[in-house]
Amino acid sequence: MEYEAVIGLEVHAQVHTRSKMFCACPVVPDTGNLPPNTYVCPVCLALPGALPVVNRQAVALGIRAALALHCAVQPLSVFARKSYFYPDLPKGYQITQYAHPLARNGYLEVDVSQRFCRIGITRIHLEEDTGKLYHGNDGTRVDFNRAGVPLLEIVSEPDMRSPDEARAYAMALRDVLVYLGLNTGDMEKGMIRFEANVSIRPQGSGTLGTRTEIKNLNSFRALSRAVDAEIARQIAILNSGGQVTLKTLGWDAAGEQLFVQRNKEQAHDYRYFPDPDIPPLAVTPEWVASIAASLPELPRARKARWVAHYGLREEDAALLVPDRALAGYFEAAVKHGLGCGVAPQDVANWMTGEVFRLLKARTSGITGARVSPERLAALLRLLYVEDAINVASAKKILEVMFETGESPERVVERLGLSQISDPALLEAVATRVIRDSPTQVAQYLDGKEPLIGWFVGQIMRETRGKAEPGQAQEIARVFLERERSNRF
Amino acid sequence: MENESITSLTREEVERIAVLAHLSLSDAEVALYREQLSVILAHAARLQAVDAGGTLPPAAVGRRPVLREDEPGATLSREEALFNGPDCDAGCFRVPPVKAME
Amino acid sequence: MIALCDLTAHEALDLLRSGEITSVALTASALDRILAVDNDVCAYLTLTPEQALAEASAADALRRAGQDLPLLGIPVAFKDNLSTRGIPTSCGSRMLDGYVPPYDATVVRRVKEAGAVVLGKTNMDAFAMGSSTENSAFFPTHNPWDLARVPGGSSGGSAAAVAAGEALLALGSDTGGSVRQPAALCGVVGVRPTYGLCSRYGLIAFASSLDQVGPVARDVTDAALLLGVIAGHDPADSTSRLDSGSDYTAYLARKDLAGLRVGVLQSHPEDGIQAEVADATRRALKTLRDLGAELVDVSLPHGVYALSTYYLIAPAEASANLARFDGVRYGFRAAADTVEALFSRARGAGFGPEVKRRIMLGTYALSAGYYEAFYIQAQKVRTLIRADFDAAFEAVDVIVGPTSPTTAFMLGERVADPLEMYRADALTLSQALAGIPAISVPCGFDAAGLPVGLQITAPEMQELRMLQVAFAFEQATDWHRRRPSLIESS
């Protein structure tokens, strides 16, 4: 029998605030590397008597995400206590939202290998992170620096049918969250974590099979590999006449294996009830409207606009869109370029080529780059519009610009890289090269025509790279042909 | 729901609740709580007779919370944070080994 | 001549301001009294005498420098569920034996900022669960009027300390009557404020939607004074009101009660009201009528469900509030090989029987399959109880009745029967459920010489009206001037 997979995702994303969800402890980017238990207070350490107070900005960012995902923000939502015991959970309950989440009923549009799908969002809610455990032989150590850091949980409908779709949805969601400024998108630091619900059913069936839950997926690769493995496992069970049972699974990323965390009979009874320490959260239409007004253009729309208005190749747009700072840089460079005749696709080529290469060698990222978008455009104008430099020089100039922060004009002048476009000068060089290379000339004339490249190289060397390669090749060809006619 | 069925606790139910609440109880305590909780719950069962229809719990009609501005504030020093910890090591609280579970 | 520690706070402040006494002398007098009677009364769990004398002398220095504050130099005590920076805070439980908070509860900070001198922390039923202070893990407190009897609870230590002159003022907490009932049983004044009037930040939570901190004092003026100091919005408590805080003493003046409509509840046989308590209440109502008040019968149709409602909601919230006591970051630690065993043993051995009973009850009420039938239904009935009060207050300005069905009972008398013990709170629960203020003031004595308390209930945020009625009653009577004989012999 042919089976179809039914996949839903729960995504936990850290909400980028300056202080924790329910207390004023600072949230710093790299909590994992801080001395343990130094970013804690009575509230997040759950000392007796301490009380939570909701962080307004966390709510505002939650609303921002809800609007970007086309959800209905609820006028009244309720924080609830989810009770269970674990050493990293200081209060013995997690404050989360249960029966009344912040927002409901949205969707995210995703492109999966040239196909478009719309994945439904069931709900979005705010909650708090737990502390961290360090396992050792002489005991487990607990650090509460991360406890109370705000998290957004985004629960999808079971609308995905393949590991690829799940992965594409997860990546698109990550891009949106990064765009909204509420998450850094840094998977290695656990800024976004996934849980997948997986079931299978006969192709075309309208009912849902028994689902399993895979927890703690920390990368896109882990997500698609684990879902893939689980679909295969379920198909094997059904094919051998067995039945899928409710389970919570984990994914061993190193061994690429699923393992059982909990069976159905060990299911938790979380005893959710409204947290009496926090009155229901009212979100006024005015608040929602003011957040809606500040919503940026989202990655998918931006990509579509670039393709339509700038004539950009789809794959280049896809490379440039996800990082909002980079996309902003690109767009600024395009705008400067358009003012002086530089084609957007040329800007894109330089961005995905040289700029990416130079950024990779540095750690500062695009925001720390010493080259402004305006100067990148100016460089490309020298190259493509004014023909004042050649490609090789342009690459060299850009590298220097990244180092020194100088303008391209100044680098050209300082290094004497302006292109030789005086034909008389080039012709003199070509005459000299041909005169000095009788062997190569003879071989060329004997029919070894690819040697033309060697002559171009010699001309470039003689001019120290300032010749325009196309022009050099043309002159070399003309002079060699002239030599041929001289011999016969 | 029958009042009988919810107000007369079985020993197993008492034990299940003790597990949920993470309370290790002696056999005598289980027996005592079974009896006492049954009496209290029988008394509480009279609430089932109240016609509360569409009444909302007070939380749903209560006041609005005051939200906190996102300003980082003071933290405890690590010495203060760990001061009351019964077993601390390397700046952390220590507990018996936990198998990585969640 | 009476000892300085037997002065009310406002009398003492007058003498401090006129320079007739010093805070050091006043504080030393309270410490002497503690030394003399606390072996018998057992009101305190922790004493801070050196610190108190240092604070007193600092208060005197401040006063000499021309400064004044609402409580400058007044010795006070805090119930042991209020977090005090650097002073052990056990909440009456073995679970928190030795726990020292790194921060002050907001109400503690306010009282300190008002210039008070801290004498120590008072005994209580563990985690404020009880009506007799016998659930303290350390020792029971004895009623200063009869040492064989309970002081009430759970703020029994605070009420006994104030009654015996071991503190001029004290703070207690009232979840279902824990300030008013011990105040009644010890012959002092106790206030439960409107929910949200006083910050709960730093109050070790029992039932979050019910807990309120309240003053214990020897007369209404002192209660008003202390209430004015602790009331007010606190950004650290999301449930604290924005519209709070007032100088209540400024509005207390001897006056008649002409035009005041006093609601009188017909008592329910199930309340089990002692005949002498009923008599004292009748006489008190007559006093109010003589002052010009009009007595009007009122009814709270759902009041009969208050006990059941309370004993589902409070334990449910407690079961979650007390989940943080797991032996990891503070508190009692049991030897264990696994984390599961660590949690269960620390909690099994660290909590006392009443606390465990309520955690069990609350866990059950929230567990799958029972949540709707128990917890949600109880919350709905709670709304109906509140609506009953709203309706009653259409017709009356305050409601008056007894605070406790009985006077102080014997130590050990009710320990074995939890439901019987719970009935001690029968008359104080509905105000807590409704979130409205109530005060207990002394209104007489039974044949055994034990005090009786009169409870005056007012609508939400009508503390001032409540205090004015209590003040007028107090001025017309002298019950609040009586002191236990223990004091004379000390």
Image: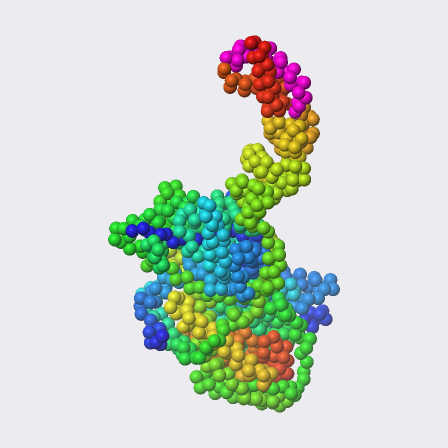
Label tally: 0
Percent across and percent down for residue C398 are 59, 82
Most foreground residue, A293 or C483: A293
Most foreground residue, A380 or C320: A380
Percent across and percent down for residue C453 are 54, 81
* Residue A379 lies within the magenta run: no
- Majority secondary structure of the magenta segment? helix
Q: Quadrant of residue C161?
A: bottom right
State which quarter of the image contains the N terminus of chain C: bottom right
Residue at 38% across / 54% down in the picture?
A6
Is residue A267 visible from the viewing direction of this image? yes
Most foreground residue, A329 or B49: A329
From this view, report whether residue C411 is shown above or below residue C344. Answer: below
Most foreground residue, C61 or A376: A376
State which quarter of the image contains the C terminus of chain C: bottom right
Percent across and percent down for residue C101 are 53, 58
Residue at 65% across / 65% down in the picture?
C114
Residue lying farthest right? Answer: C66
| Colouring of the image | rainbow
From this view, report whether residue A338 is shown above or below residue C468. Answer: above
* Residue A428 lies within the magenta run: yes
Residue lying farthest left? Answer: A241
Is residue C274 visible from the viewing direction of this image? no
Residue at 44% across / 69% down in the picture?
C315
Q: Which residues are magenta?
A: A419-446
Residue at 68% across / 21% down in the picture?
A422
Percent across and percent down for residue B44 are 41, 76
